[in-house]
Image (spheres, rainbow, N blue to C red):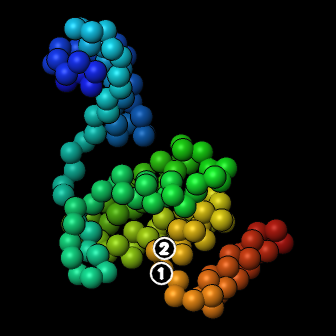
Amino acid sequence: MQCPHCHKKSSKVIDSRPTENGRVIRRRRECENCGYRYTTFERIEETPLLVIKSNGNREEFNREKILKGIIRSAEKRPVPMIEMTKIVDHVENKIRSAGDNEVSSQLIGSYVMNELADIDEISYIRFASVYRQFKDMTVFYNELKGVLEKDKKKRDK
């Protein structure tokens, strides 16, 4: 493993532990050259998964792209990073458990929105406004009305 500080390739593992329900190994490493400590993650290499975009293009599934979208929608909101990462994990697990090699970006977006709706309504609306490409205030209002009705049902229980 190459040190991100001095770029030498000699390091030793200090600590190793499973994360994400045993699907990932987190390793703390120390560079034997400069002593810099860093963390690496080892994941199971899964079969390639392609995302079919709304324009018909295909691109490789990228969990970091989903995480960035969630982070943007939750900016300045009380949503911990661990919750955002869990959303990405849940979405990826749903997609991979379906067994298909291709998935639509619309399905991914709806999975993310379902998860966000339970965590933070403002983040949900922000994500939905980009994902659904709100064209005018009517579409925005209808989405907001749906959130308010869902919230009312939760409180009435």
Q: Position of residue 112 (x, y in %)?
A: 48, 65
The residue under label 1 is which amino acid type? Gln
The residue under label 2 is which amino acid type? Val
Give the secondary structure at mark 2.
helix
- Relative to 34, 19 lies left or right: right
Give the secondary structure at mark 1.
loop
Badge 2 is on which residue?
130
- Residue placed at 60% from the left, 63% from the top? 123
Q: Quadrant of the N terminus?
A: top left
Residue 55 lies, with reference to residue 29, above or below; the image says below
- Tell me, for residue 94, which label it has, or none: none
- Relative to 48, 109 lies left or right: right
Q: How many marks?
A: 2
Q: Position of residue 69 (x, y in %)?
A: 45, 60
Residue 144 lies, with reference to residue 93, above or below; the image says below
Residue 147 lies, with reference to residue 30, above or below; the image says below
Specify whether residue 57 is in view: yes
- Confirm or deny contact between disc 1 and disc 2 (CB under 8 A): yes
Q: Quadrant of the C terminus?
A: bottom right
- Residue placed at 63% from the left, 58% from the top? 119
Badge 1 is on which residue?
133
- Residue placed at 28% from the left, 21% from the top? 5
- Residue placed at 75% from the left, 71% from the top? 151
Specify whether residue 146 is in view: no
Q: Residues within 10 Å of mark 2 (few under 14, many from 20)?
A: few
Q: Position of residue 8 (x, y in %)?
A: 17, 17
Q: Position of residue 39 (x, y in %)?
A: 35, 26
- Relative to 52, 122 lies left or right: right
Extreme residue in the right direction:
156
